Image (cartoon, rainbow, N blue to C red):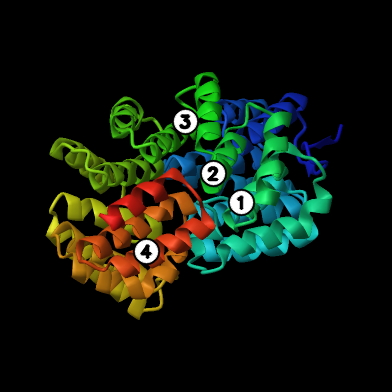
Amino acid sequence: MAFEDRYGLAISTSSEVAAQRYREGIDLLLSAWPGASEALDTAIEADPDFALAHAARSRTHLIYAEMQPAREKAATARQLVARNGSAREKSHVEILALTTEGQPAKALELALDHLDSWPRDALIMSLPLGAFGLFAFSGMADHDQARVDLCERYKRHYGDDWWFQTFHGWSHTENGSLEIGRPLTQRAFERRRENAHALHALAHAMFEDGSTADAEDLIAGWLPIYHRSGLLHGHVAWHQALLALENGDSEKAGAIYAERLQPKVNPAPPLNVMTDGVSLLWRLQASGHPVQREAWLDQADHAERWFPKTGNSFVDVHMALLAAMTGNWSALEARIADLDARRDQGKLPAGLVVPTICRAARAFAEANYRTCAEILQPVSAEVVRIGGSHAQREMIEDTLLIALMKSGEAAKARELLDRRLHRRPSLRDTRWRTAVAA
């Protein structure tokens, strides 16, 4: 009997159980819902020679930075698919293996070629998309537009598929087309409420268009059905904390950090734990809410264990902020030196903006606000190249805004706020404008 995945693509397994559990596992993976790893493990148990199940399981290991099992599963998938896989399956496995081996540029190149032939290969389509996808972490200045272009190119192949509409909508939202993005995401969420990516994308749309009350209600009503082991549970809570800050409620934001985001209670992937935690602590401190040094040090202990070296620009920026806020100047300068060396060797895709933000972080932490502004302002338009979302990168914009205000550059601060208001009307802008006027 021949088996297919949910998108009608043939899958090489002789087991009906393996095929069924693989389909379930991929849907759980694409919706960031708990149970994907367990479903894929069952598929492998039912058919140990099922290459695609091994490759997908490698992906779930990689997301949680479980590097040894991720590489082992990828290697097994390669061996198996070479024996009995189709051309599509061989390409699929190779792309996933490359991401596991730390070759994102090659993986992106092959993924785009792959989609020309097999546009309904949703797991491969998912790789360039998202705030932490291959486009976002490529160093491109136009990755927001690249995601939209990819989705528009292949949307006819997906129709009203809940997964595709989730990321099609999110891509438009991040690219500034909220009138397209929010309705698409809303429809995706209505089709499958057990879809953390859709909830997350909808929260982004509401954040961007200033519908903070809608976002608060949405998250408060949905988060209780999402188990804390879910991939995005902590990150959705991070959004909840940002909304509290938008309303000036730093006490609530601090409580969310303590209850859901600090490393010892947050089961999210290490990347999410570090970036969400550091950025929220920074925002709390910038909002005048005292942050205990122990909180910064706890984050530092977690981050230094998982991210001791440079490599991902989004990580490097957050590590620099963390080192600056804990006064770990030797670690910060070592990271900057490594980034400079990588840039000189042509190995830093995002370019000059990364070490520049790191230098600005030190100036800011040392209260050299004029220096911070002078360092950061020339590269402010290039911050998009570090990856992540608008909501995440806004922290860097806030750093520049506060530096301008504290160095007496009110006119430049107002100009920066005008640009933000044009993009995103929100309560925070009112609060910042009051600060500038004062």
Residue toward you, 362 or 40: 362
Label 3: element kind: helix
Query: Which residue sits at x=62%, y=48%?
Result: 170
Image marks 2 and 3: residues in contact by CB distance under 8 Å: no
| Label 3 Cα neighbours within 10 Å, binned few <14 / some 14-19 / many ≥20 | many
Q: Nearer the viewer, mark 3 or mark 1?
A: 1
Residue 82 seen: no
Q: Residue beneath label 3, please?
A: 233
Label 4: element kind: helix
- Compared with 181, 366 (above or below) is below
The tag earlier along the polypeptide, 2 or 3, is 2
Question: On the rendered structure, is 248 left or right of 191?
Answer: left
- Compared with 350, 287 (above or below) is above
Q: Residue beneath label 1, please?
A: 173
Which part of the image, by quadrant, shows the N terminus? top right
Q: Residue beneath label 4, please?
A: 414
Q: Where is residue 211 drawn, in percent x and y?
A: 54, 39
Image marks 2 and 1: residues in contact by CB distance under 8 Å: yes
Q: Amino acid at mark 1?
A: Thr
The tag earlier along the polypeptide, 3 or 1, is 1
Residue toward you, 235 or 15: 235
Label 1: element kind: helix
Query: Which residue sits at x=23%, y=71%?
Result: 337
Residue 87 seen: yes
Residue toward you, 190 or 129: 190
Q: Place residue 243 in its image quadrant.
A: top left
